[in-house]
Image (cartoon, rainbow, N blue to C red):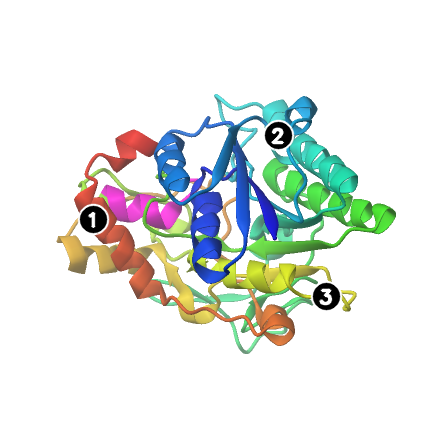
Amino acid sequence: MKLLITGICGFVGSSLAESLLERRAGISILGIDNLMRPGSELNRVRLRKLGVTLIHGDIRQASDFEALPAVDWVIDAAANPSVLAGIQSGFSSRQLLEHNLVSVVNVLEYCKTQRAGLLLLSTSRVYSIEALASLPLRAEADAFHLDEKATLPAGVSQKGIGVNFSTRAPISLYGSSKLAAETIALEYGDAFGFPVWINRCGVLAGAGQFGTPDQGIFSYWIHAHARRRPLRYIGFDGTGKQIRDLFHPRDLTALVDAQIHTAAKSAQRIYCAGGGPANAISLARLNAWCDARFGAHAPSADTRPRRYDIPWVIMDSSNAERDFGWRIETPMERVFEEIAQHAESHPDWLEISA
C-alpha cells in the first residue's frame, strides 16, 4: 500500500508516518510539506532516515501535484491549526483559507485523478461557539465539569461532544474553513466514487510538538513552565478552570490504520477522536502537575475574555470505538512525562519551534 501524507514534516504528520511504518509492514510513504513551520526541517531529517520519500512542495499550488506518483490513500494532515488564525496579525484570513480550504480542493482533485482514498484530519473546533459556551457547567476549585443534573443539548453527554453537536455559526474562521473542507471532501467522494473518512480530532499532544500556545497548549505549557517563562490563565476569571482532553498521535494512528483497511459499509463518514473524560484536564491542574515535576511556578491571571475561547471541550469517541474497536492506549500522564523529558533534553525547543 502506498500512502501520501500532506504536511508530513509537522508534528502530527511526522508522528503518523513513523507510527504507521512501525505498525504495518508492506507500506511505503510519500510525504509533501512546504517546510514553513519552524522546526519542520528537523522532522525531515528524521523521516528520511525511516525511508520516507519527501517532496518539498506546497499543496496550495495545484501544479505541485502534477509530478506526484499514484498512491492508494492520502492522509491530509496539512493545515494551519490555530483557532485564532486569520484574526491575528501576521497571518491573514485569505492565507488561512488558502491553507485550510484551497489546499483541500487540490488534494481532492489529486484523489479524483489517482482514484485514491482520502483521510481528512479535521478538528473539534467545527462546533458552534455559542452552543459550546452555553453548555451547563459546574465549577470546582480548579476545573469546570459538565453538570450531570442538567438537561443537555443534542450531541453532548458525559462522554463528551459527538458528531451531531451543533455546527451553527459562528465557529471561528479556522473552524469554518475546516467544516467547509469536510463538506467538500464528502461531496467529492460521493461524486467521483472514492472513499473518504473524516476525523474531528481533539487536542493532540506529545514530545516534539511545535510549541505555541494557540496550536499546542499542553506542550507549550510544559516547556514554558520548565523554562520559567511567564504563563497566563486567560479569561474565565483568570482561574485556569477551562478543560480540554488530549491524546497522542500514535493513538490516532490506530484509528487511521483501521479506517484505511476497512471496507466502507456504514453511512457514517465523520468520527470524533479524542482523549475523552479519562484524559481531560484543566490548565490549573496541568500547572499543578508541572509544579510537582519542575517546582512551583505560578501563572498570572488575565480575566479579560479572548475571542473563540470556550470553557469545556471533551470529545466523545464512542462511535470510533464501536465501529473500529478504537480506544486510547497512551494515558495523559505518560504524554505529559514524554513532553517533560523532551523539555529537559531540548531547553531551546521553544526558540526552535515557536
Residue beneath the point at 63% across and 74% down: 151
On screen, 117 above or below 154? Answer: above
The residue type indicated by label 2 comes to Ile
Q: Position of residue 273 (x, y in %)?
A: 55, 61
* Horizontal and vertical percent position of residue 209: 37, 44
Amino acid of disc 1: Ala
**Judging from the image, what secondary structure is the residue with disc 2 in?**
loop
> Is 345 contained in the magenta span?
no
Residue under label 2, please give it. 59
Q: Count residues near mark 2 (Cα–Cα under 10 Å), then give few for <14, some for 14-19, many for 20+.
A: many
Segment tinted magenta in the rendering: 213-224
**Residue under numbered circle 1:** 298
Q: Residue furthest right?
A: 191
Question: Most extreme residue toward the front, as rendered?
Answer: 26
Number of marks in picture? 3
Q: CA distance from mark 2 to mark 1?
A: 42 Å
Q: Is residue 347 above or below residue 265?
A: above
- Residue 228, compared with residue 37, is above or below; it is below
- The residue closer to the viewer here, 124 or 311, is 124
